[in-house]
Image (cartoon, grey):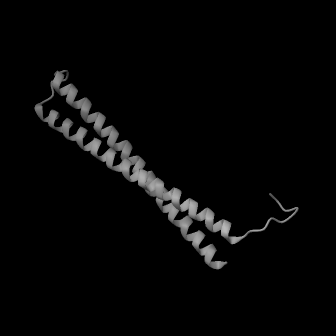
């Protein structure tokens, strides 16, 4: 019985760690999208000459756009893998709980 409780505790601990990693990945996806769209906007502004920015602004905009898209894509992939692992661990936790063989006590609290 103690082994099942330890297993469930270990699974729940790992789920919490993965949930934190998923939140970090979400933030990185958002930061990447902001960088990508900001870089793209800087490219457009530089090319149209609206603000009279120097050519280095074009290079910075291109780097921001490409780097942002790469970061968002990579973080999105990591987020998908993390969420899949969380779902698998939640299934294993549910199976472990079912395997304990808990009994319903008549007249007990729900």
The percent position of residue 104, horizontal first and vertical second, equals 80, 65
Q: 84 or 6: nearer the eye?
A: 84
In this view, which residue lies farthest toward the right?
107
Residue 104, placed above or below residue 40: below
Residue 8, placed above or below residue 62: below
In this view, which residue lies farthest toward the left?
55
Q: Is residue 100 left or right of residue 93?
A: right
Residue 21, placed above or below residue 30: below
Q: 10 or 102: nearer the eye?
A: 102
The percent position of residue 97, horizontal first and vertical second, equals 65, 66
The residue sitting at 28% across, 34% down in the picture is 38
Quarter of the image for residue 33 reads: top left
User: Quick one: quadrant of the C terminus?
Assistant: bottom right
The residue sitting at 33% across, 38% down in the picture is 34
User: Quick one: quadrant of the N terminus?
Assistant: bottom right
The residue sitting at 28% across, 42% down in the picture is 68
Q: Is residue 30 left or right of residue 9?
A: left
Q: Give the total number of marks visible in the rendering.
A: 0
In this view, which residue lies farthest toward the bottom?
2
Q: Is residue 106 left or right of residue 98?
A: right
Q: Is residue 110 left or right of residue 12?
A: right
Q: 82 or 39: nearer the eye?
A: 82
The residue sitting at 72% across, 70% down in the picture is 101
Quarter of the image for residue 51 reads: top left
The percent position of residue 46, horizontal first and vertical second, equals 17, 27
The percent position of residue 64, horizontal first and vertical second, equals 23, 40
């Amino acid at each position: 019985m103690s082994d099942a409780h330890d297993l469930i505790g270990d699974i729940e601990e790992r789920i919490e760690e993965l949930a934190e990693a998923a939140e970090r990945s979400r933030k990185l996806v958002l930061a990447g999208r902001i960088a990508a769209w900001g870089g793209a906007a800087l490219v457009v502004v530089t090319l149209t000459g609206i603000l009279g920015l120097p050519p280095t602004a074009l290079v910075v905009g291109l780097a921001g756009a490409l780097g942002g898209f790469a970061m968002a894509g990579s973080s999105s992939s990591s987020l998908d893998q993390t969420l899949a692992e969380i779902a698998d661990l939640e299934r294993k936790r549910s199976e472990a709980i079912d395997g304990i063989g808990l009994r319903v006590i008549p007249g007990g609290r729900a």
